[in-house]
Image (cartoon, helix red, strand yellow):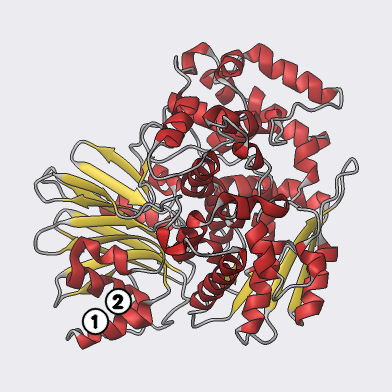
Amino acid sequence: MCGISGEVRRDGRAPDASAVARMTAAQSDRGPDGEGAWRHGGVALGHRRLKVIDLSERSAQPMVDEGLGLAIVFNGCIYNYPELRAELSAAGYSFRSSGDTEVLLTAYHRWGDAFVEHLLGMFAFAITERDSGRVLLGRDRLGIKPLYLAETPGRLRFASTLPALLAAGDVDTAIDPVALHHYLSFHAVVPAPRTILAGVRKLPPATTLALEPDGRRTERTYWAPRFARDPAHAGWDARDWQDAVLASLRTAVRRRLVSDVPVGVLLSGGLDSSLLTALLVGEGQDALATFSVGFEAVDGREGDEFRWSDLVAREFGTDHHRIEVPTGRLLPALPHAIAAMPEPMVSHDCVGFHLLSQEVARSIKVVQSGQGADEVFAGYHWYPPMTAPGADAATYLRAFADRDHAAMARLVDPAHLVDDDVSGDFVRAAFAADGADEPADRALRLDTTVMLVEDPVKRVDAMTMAWGLEARVPFLDHELVELAAACPPALKLAQGGKGVLKDAARAVLPAAVIDRPKGYFPVPALTALRGPYLELVRDALHDPAAKDRGLFRAAEVDRLLAVADAGGEELTPLGGNTLWQLGLLECWLQARGV
């Protein structure tokens, strides 16, 4: 886990080493254990390192192999690197380090651009060929590791975070109106390649981008799961699926134990993190460190689920850490949490993860986390309606979208409003694409490959890496995702959602944990928006920068503030606070100096 950056020139000019240095410095939180830089020809690379595998300087980056004529910067972890190393050694390659970075570099030399198909893990990388100047950028299948791009004629810059690109300078910071539409309609999800800023894009998941010396570029999608029934499973009954899911998850958990430092668990007490805990203990992780966070109740909204996480910790004898956050600590943490967001993110649990990660990072560097299970195994309330006769993209949008295009026109200033319903069009196009059998399959495919990437996964990466903490997500093992995608939706939707996962879990978890009501990661003070939290939002929306930007209709902002002043709140279909959605966007833009 690290922060990477770089600049590629194709106009005959030397790359700006000072700009790369600024990008690298802006990512120091992601890599507190070391830094490095490299430049040759039209390419400059920068790196901040978090030491997890091969703690020696032999795995420092940028890593250069003079014999192979290659250099690399890499963020992530390749879980099958020992197996790949053995295979490459048998093919005649030798290694100076004991880590995964050198294996990745050597694998590129062996298999070319297709080497990504050999990798099990989470990754974003840039590899350059010293002699030709060719550069290959790539990102893992589920987009667990980020890669942002800023391009001008003859120059491309990249970094692990959007703010790092802003630190380099010379970025078009105009608001992208299509991205704004997505942010306000698609629950703050802005699908790749767009970001809220017109001058910054992101490489989509499961994608490589080759930058050739003559200026040509080739973008390739190397993985796309099929949400369809596989004839190989035609004879399977429900028990076969349960056994296969548990075996695949067990493998995913085992893979994510590869580390030269201890691995803990973020334990909410829900099904997903509890299942990871049980499987890790089953793998022989004695005195496994587990961590839970909770907040004070506000207006009757509970802010913790400690009774469940305590139950699981007792059941499996973990070294449990309960982190209780008083409401007074939340407000001072908000600016740093917002600054840690690579893009504006409205989920309240961003702040929860931020504070949890701060405490966890005091004692451990690597954790496993349960994100992804709800999208992969159909745990959300908007999936059951997808089984009704005639269910389609409109059914999904009614349950998931924050507002339709007409409501957007009442909220967004005309200068920033696109003419067409671009968010609805995006969903409708996704539902129409081949490779998904049923409406529920289409919703799950959209959420697994887009929403999951741009909300829960991004949130976990950003908030943990802000404290130099590496989070691994077994439910996003791509082989487990492929298995779940092939599973009949009825098995996943059973028992109120995640039925096949719940039944698989019965082999290792107490029934009380499996059958408990579904919980969330509540931060009540941000849902209620009272007192200083309301004033923070009011100040952001009344700031001169916000007024100059003019994203929203002033009368609508005033109405929403009046509702809040009267003790009310206007919620989206998913329970988000509309005023927080507007205020968070402005807080993020102002924190970035946009």
* Residue 567 position (above or below residue 369): above
Categorize mark 2 by other alpha carbons within 10 Å: few (<14), some (14-19), many (20+): many
Q: Position of residue 201 (x, y in %)?
A: 37, 40
| Residue nearer the viewer, 148 or 372 | 372
Q: Secondary structure at mark 2?
A: helix
Q: Using the numbered discs, state the Cα–Cα distance from disc 2 to disc 1 in whole angstroms.
A: 8 Å
Q: Amino acid at mark 2?
A: Val
Asked where in the image residue 502 lies, by quadrant, the reply is bottom right
* Residue 469 position (above or below residue 329): below
Q: Is 44 positioned to the left or the right of 472 in the image?
A: left
Q: Which residue is mark 1?
A: 88
Q: Nearer the viewer, mark 2 or mark 1?
A: 1
| Residue nearer the viewer, 358 or 391 | 391
* Residue 392 position (above or below residue 123): above
Q: Is 165 positioned to the left or the right of 115 in the image?
A: right
Q: How many marks?
A: 2
Q: Is 534 positioned to the left or the right of 585 in the image?
A: right
Whether residues under marks 2 and 1 lie with C-beta atoms below 8 angstroms apart, the answer is yes
* Residue 556 position (above or below residue 451): above
Q: Position of residue 70 (x, y in %)?
A: 19, 68
Is residue 442 among the parts visible in the rendering?
Answer: yes
Residue drawn at (68%, 42%), measured in percent from left and top?
381
Q: Which residue is mark 2?
A: 103
Q: Amino acid at mark 1?
A: Leu
Q: Secondary structure at mark 1?
A: helix
Categorize mark 1 by other alpha carbons within 10 Å: few (<14), some (14-19), many (20+): some
